[in-house]
Amino acid sequence: MKDSTWHPLHPKNLGEHLEKHVVQGGKVLGHNLMGFDLPVLRDALDCFYAGHLMSKSDVVVDTAALMRSASGNVHHLEDICKHTLGSGKTMKSEDAPRLWKEGKRLEVANYCLKDCQLVYDVWFHGKEEGFVKTRNPETGVIDDIEVMW
């Protein structure tokens, strides 16, 4: 991805990289960060700083939480991307752990990178246009959800 910095995923230094990024004014962007990514990093990798970030709403931009606040519903990244960007994810999230165990680590890594790009593209669209599109889980209608991020 353009203008990205990559670091080894190692519990020894992951927290240091996250902390340095935030201290230098960076934000942490993701879809369902508070409900999945940060708790996994905190618990599975024993990354203290990931747990610390969970109390920092000023530096964590969780598009899932923001969408839920704006609409009152849970919205999956696949639906948001499909209806806002016209493209979707490369695999189902629940398939990643199985593929990882099967040794298909490059496939999982590429999926994770693609997801990061999709979240950024959705966030950027919402920031520029003031809305994203997704299917209303109750009615099935494609709605424009106003976002202020």
Image (cartoon, rainbow, N blue to C red):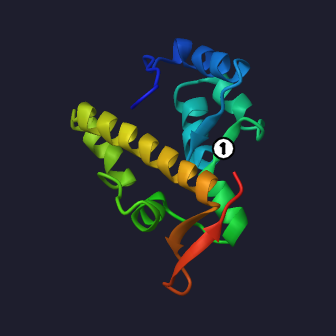
**Left or right: 46, with 69 as reference point:** left
Up the image or down, 69 lies above or below 100; here it is below
Q: Residue at x 55, y 19 (%)?
A: 14
Displayed quadrant of residue 15? top right
Residue 2 is situated, as x and y percent measured from the top left of the image, at 41, 29
Q: Nearer the viewer, residue 32 or 133?
A: 133
Displayed quadrant of residue 34? top right
The secondary structure type at the circle numbered 1 is strand
Q: Amino acid at mark 1?
A: Val
Residue 90 is situated, as x and y percent measured from the top left of the image, at 29, 51
Q: Nearer the viewer, residue 20 or 86?
A: 86
**Left or right: 119, with 20 as reference point:** left
Number of residue marks: 1
Q: Residue at x 63, y 52 (%)?
A: 127
Q: Residue at x 60, y 53 (%)?
A: 128
Q: Quadrant of the N terminus?
A: top left
Up the image or down, 93 lies above or below 146; here it is above
Up the image or down, 87 lies above or below 59; here it is below
Q: Residues within 10 Å of mark 1 (few under 14, many from 20)?
A: many
Q: Residue at x 43, y 42 (%)?
A: 117
- Which residue is the site of mark 1? 61
Residue 134 is situated, as x and y percent measured from the top left of the image, at 51, 70
Q: Nearer the viewer, residue 52 or 120?
A: 120
Displayed quadrant of residue 74? bottom right
